[in-house]
Image: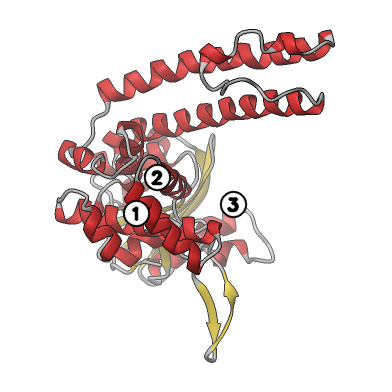
Amino acid sequence: MRFYTEKHRHYCGIDLHARTMYLCIVNGEGKILLHQNMPAAPESFLAAVKRFRQDLVVAVECMFTWYWLADCCAQNDIPFVLGHALYIKAIHGSKVKNDRIDCKKLALLLRGGLFPMAYVYPSELRATRDLLRRRMYFMRKRAELNVHVQNTNSQYNLAPLPGKIAYKKNRADVSGRFADPAARKSVDLDLALMDTYDSLLREVEGHIRDHARAHDHDALRRLQTIPGVGKILALAILYEVGGIDRFSRVQDFVSYCRLVKPQIESGGKVYGHSGKKIGNAHLKWAFSEAACLFLRQNPEAQAYYARLKRKHPPGKALAVLAHKIGRATYFILKRRTDFDMTKFING
């Protein structure tokens, strides 16, 4: 956990919503200088803070509408701090909670050096990162349709499908297997939606490949030296990381990727694990996916995975493999080197 500890003359805490925001400005002594509700718009914000612009810092809890406020502060040379929503316990643990109280607490946490920081993602890369996340959403919806067709086939105790319907060439006459017209219609709908998603995914992947403003094309190439990592998965990792220099240690990186389980310890005793939702869920998915693809048509990796399974259950062994790929990714990006299978297995 990182806290914002720099000293300023004025501290501004904002409880931000889609259409409104409650703003509180305090000075270095903690005295409230401004405390009011206003429309969530750049003009309203700049007019409100105009009198306090001298050495002002602005803080807001991370939620889906923070982009415009971060950009507005950047354009007007106002320091901006994004708060980590799961770490701000002073707000979520309150007996009484409302916008007026919340923005005051944000300002006081900022003044006291106890404001937990989240990463302010660069504005020029946000749209592409969000598009990659949207692609992942479409892929999951397509996978749900695939599973529904197979489950419907099993419900009627029919023979296994002759091929993987993930491929369009294997979808012909699938609905003809069902005698009931309603069942046929249900499967036809699933297959029609899969065709639509296939078209959309081809379009969005082509757009990403053609227009992705990857900040480091050399890093993109190096990530693809990891067996099983193609251009789309490499782009997803690169855009979710944002910049490897913000991680000073490999331990910080794998923790951010949700590849470790933090312990709860007190008095020398371990009471379990916590923090499963702290970190980047998209990087957790990316490295889990990379671990599965890493094993395909890769005898060296399969032999290494077999050794891991002698020590751990299969699921745990796969998690260990994903963790190790995450560590390798950190050093590939940090040292600007290609993937080395010998070092990976023996290191």
State the residue position of label 3.
99
The three-letter code of the residue at mark 3 reads Asp
Q: Secondary structure at mark 2?
A: helix
* CA neighbours of label 3 inside 10 A, class few (<14), some (14 to 19), many (20+): some
In the picture, which quadrant includes the C terminus? bottom left
Residue 291 — which label?
none
Quarter of image, res 252: bottom left
Q: Distance of mark 2 from mark 3, alpha carbons? A: 42 Å
51 with respect to 31 (left or right): left
Q: Left or right of 331: which side holds 174? A: right
Q: At which x and y percent is residue 60?
A: 44, 51
Residue extending furthest toward the bottom = 267
Label 1 crowd (10 A; few <14 / some 14-19 / many >=20): many
In percent of width and height, residue 196 lies at 54, 13
Can residue 259 be seen here? Answer: no
**First in residue order: circle 2 vs circle 1:** 2
Say which residue appears at 25% left-offset and 64% top-offset: 248
Please name the residue shown 15% across and 51% down the image.
Answer: 337
Q: Which residue is mark 2?
A: 290
Q: Amino acid at mark 1?
A: Ile
Q: Is residue 96 visible?
A: yes
The residue indicated by pointer 1 is: 325
| Residue 37 percent location from the top left of the image | 54, 45
Closest to the camera, between mark 2 and mark 3, is 2
Q: Are marks 2 and 1 in contact (CB under 8 Å)?
A: yes
- Asked which secondary structure carries label 1, the reply is helix
1 or 3: tag closer to the N-terminus:
3
Residue 6 image-quadrant placement:
bottom left
